[in-house]
Image (cartoon, grey):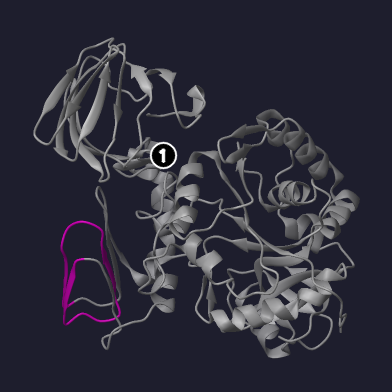
Amino acid sequence: MVDIAMATPPLVPLILCGGTGTRLWPLSRASYPKQYWALAGASEATLLQQTHQRLQDLPGLAAPILVCNEDHRFIVAEQMRQIDVEPSAILLEPVGRNTAPAVAVAALQATSRGEDPLLLVLAADHVIRDEERFRLTVSAGLAAASAGQLVTFGIVPTAPETGYGYIESAEPLSANHPVPIARFVEKPDRATAEGFLASGRFTWNSGMFLFRASAILSELERLAPEVVSACRSALEHDSADLDFLRLEREAFAGCPSVAIDVAVMERTDRGCVLALDAQWSDVGSWSALWETADRDKQGNVLRGRVISRESRNCYLRSEHRLVVGLGVEDLVVVETDDVVLVAHRDRAQDVKSIVSQLEGEGAPESKAHRRIYRPWGYYDGVVDGDRWQVKKIQVKPGASLSLQMHHHRAEHWVVVQGTALVEKDGVEELLAENQSTYIPLGSRHRLINPGKIPVELIEVQSGPYLGEDDIVRFDDRYGRAKEILARS
């Protein structure tokens, strides 16, 4: 048993925001994955926001470090702003390289000023319903982690699951004291999983960890030095981008893609495990989401504009249009702006294969919604025609599109809400509701919202080519690099 008492250093949440969550398609897509949606319970908070909110009252809690895909940086920043959290750093991965590099760059960043905090490594897309039990279990690991142990949280299994990796403890499991790890086991077959549960020494591998920044760096240097070397180079040549820290692409891309479990935890002699029994789920499918949610008397989970009559054990979700379930059982129905999924709950895991098929066909529904989020707001694709298309644009108060021009398209803007300040070839005009302006091909233009309510406008584009890469940018207040902008 690991039992060490000492002063506790600051506790820095390290929230990993990667992943696309394709098994929760069509809601979760590459452009807006599941961690940025409100999925758990009746809360309006997203999974990312709930990940940080459940940490309140932990001793020594400091500002978090977040690691995310650079394409999602403004979503992450905005969702943190909404819950009044100012991260100590938002690190931008130019490419995904799994969890070991993400932990390495965060640990290097955390120790760059001579500090050595505890890092509480969390995935941004987990659901934990018993938050008080979660905080008690984390607190139980603080002393061991402060002393240099690498603590992992093993989920007390509720069934012989074959979709999770397992952790075997060398001593009887406890939620109050970390115990040494005997071994990690890859996803077992059912008979093996049943044996694991019967032994009482196995937990599910949650992917959540607690350790000092210096301790994990020391073990990474010993067991995976190429990871630390590449990450150190990526940080040494990083670039500041507003509130973000952009890792140097070439150095980070050269880093091995490996999980922290494989790189360190399976090989270290400093690992220990705490049993976590807090109604945890990684919401890896629609059926898993149904299982963890509060259900009505008929066993249904209803979200959005839904009517259910004589239906049982269904997950029915509407994002836009009315969804009616009449006399159906064991179904998952998810409606979005461009897709309706209807699946038996037992087949919910197969959604990932549909996404793969759509990707192979080059279908836009595989990766993005019609609504695309930008730092200034969002735009919705309304309708596409031959040489023309219509979009709805919303610009937040005080926000601005970049100063730009197009080679192949003209645009007509009609304001339907708020007041818009339009700059066109150096001339400014103020447009109120029901007023419009025409942006000819080649004109330098920008739209600013000077008011206190969002501006909404209808944009009609016309021309021989309407791709989002037909744009030349001259000025952008968000510091976005030209080559990674899809639309400003």
For label 1, the residue is 375
Which x, y percent locates residue 63?
Answer: 63, 58
Residue 186 in view (yes/no)? no
Q: Name the residue at 47% across, 53% down.
A: 81
Please name whichever residue, 338 or 93, is drawn nearer the observer in this view of the structure. Answer: 93
Q: Name the residue at 17% across, 58% down.
A: 321
Question: Does the magenta portion include 451?
Answer: no
Check the image and report above or below for 151 versus 112: below
- In the picture, measured across the screen, residue 404 lies left or right of residue 93, that is left
Which x, y percent locates residue 371?
Answer: 30, 43
Q: Amino acid at mark 1?
A: Pro
Q: Name the residue at 29% across, 42% down.
A: 370
Check the image and report above or below for 100 versus 295: above
Residue 7 in view (yes/no)? yes
Q: How many marks?
A: 1
Mark 1 surroundings within 10 Å by alpha-carbon count, few (fewer than 14), some (14 through 19), many (20 or more): some
Element type where label 1 sits in the image:
loop
Check the image and report above or below for 261 versus 106: below
Please name whichever residue, 469 or 213, is drawn nearer the observer in this view of the structure. Answer: 213
Please name whichever residue, 9 or 13, is drawn nearer the observer in this view of the structure. Answer: 9
Dividing the picture into quarters, in which one does residue 227 lie? Answer: top right
- In the picture, measured across the screen, residue 365 lies left or right of residue 150, that is left
Q: Which residues are magenta?
A: 305-327
Dividing the picture into quarters, in which one does residue 2 lie? Answer: bottom right
Q: Name the residue at 20% across, 76% down.
A: 328
Question: Does the magenta portion include 326?
Answer: yes
Which x, y percent locates residue 8?
Answer: 80, 72
Which x, y percent locates residue 108?
Answer: 78, 47
